[in-house]
Amino acid sequence: MERNKEKIRIVIDTNILMSALIKDNAFTEKLLKSEFLDLYYPEDGLNEIEYYKDYIISKRNKFAQIKSFEYALKFILESVQIIPSELYSSRIREAYEIMKNIDEKDTPFLALALQLNCPVWSNDPHLKQQKIAVAYTTDEISRLLKTASLFND
């Protein structure tokens, strides 16, 4: 990567992490490990990963993954900055008001995106219903990086 190229800053939703955790070496994992993205994840989202842990493990077993869930999670999170909730708590109320009729569970992700003034990466179509922060899908992130000639799958 050229030194003068800025990384794309983006908040990631739990479904993006889950996608990478379900199958080792998945395309989403490659994007998460890309040197062209600065990835942020709200501390509050860690509870969601724990909540879905058994589901993720059951899916991983279908793919006969070599890495354990814990190892895979650690490997993925090496590329992600976990942001403490007190650093985006001032935006929670605003984000909740926007998300309460869409999906209030996404409040911390939107709050963090508002605090960092950056987009959200999520494959949940409902996140695009809010109009205050840009929301990208995995396909859109891939196209964005390819357009900038930063990433080839």
Image: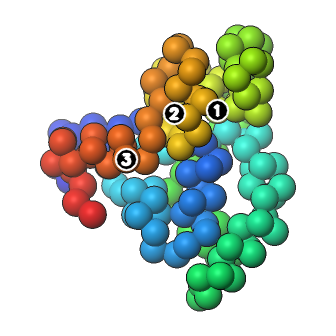
Amino acid type of the residue that numbered disc 3 sits on in the rendered structure: Asp
Q: Where is residue 34 in the image (x, y as percent from the top left)?
A: 36, 57
Residue beneath disc 1: 109
Q: Is residue 86 visible?
A: no
* Residue nearer the viewer, 90 or 31: 31
The quarter of the picture where the C terminus appears is bottom left
Q: Can residue 36 be seen in this view?
A: yes
Residue beneath disc 2: 120
Which of the two labelled residues, at mark 1 and mark 2, occupies the earlier sequence position?
A: 1
Of helix, strand and loop, which one carries label 3? helix
Where 53 sits versus 82, above or below? below
Q: Which image quadrant for residue 94?
A: top right
**For the residues marked 2 and 3, what is the alpha-carbon distance in whole angstroms?**
13 Å
Marks 2 and 1: in contact by CB < 8 Å? yes
Task: Residue at 81% x, 49% y: name it.
Answer: 47
Where 19 sits versus 68, above or below? above
Amino acid type of the residue that numbered disc 2 sits on in the rendered structure: Val
Residue beneath disc 3: 139
**For the residues marked 1 and 3, what is the alpha-carbon distance in whole angstroms?**
19 Å
Q: Could you tell whether 74 is left or right of 103 in the image?
A: left
Task: Residue at 65% x, 23% y: name it.
Answer: 111
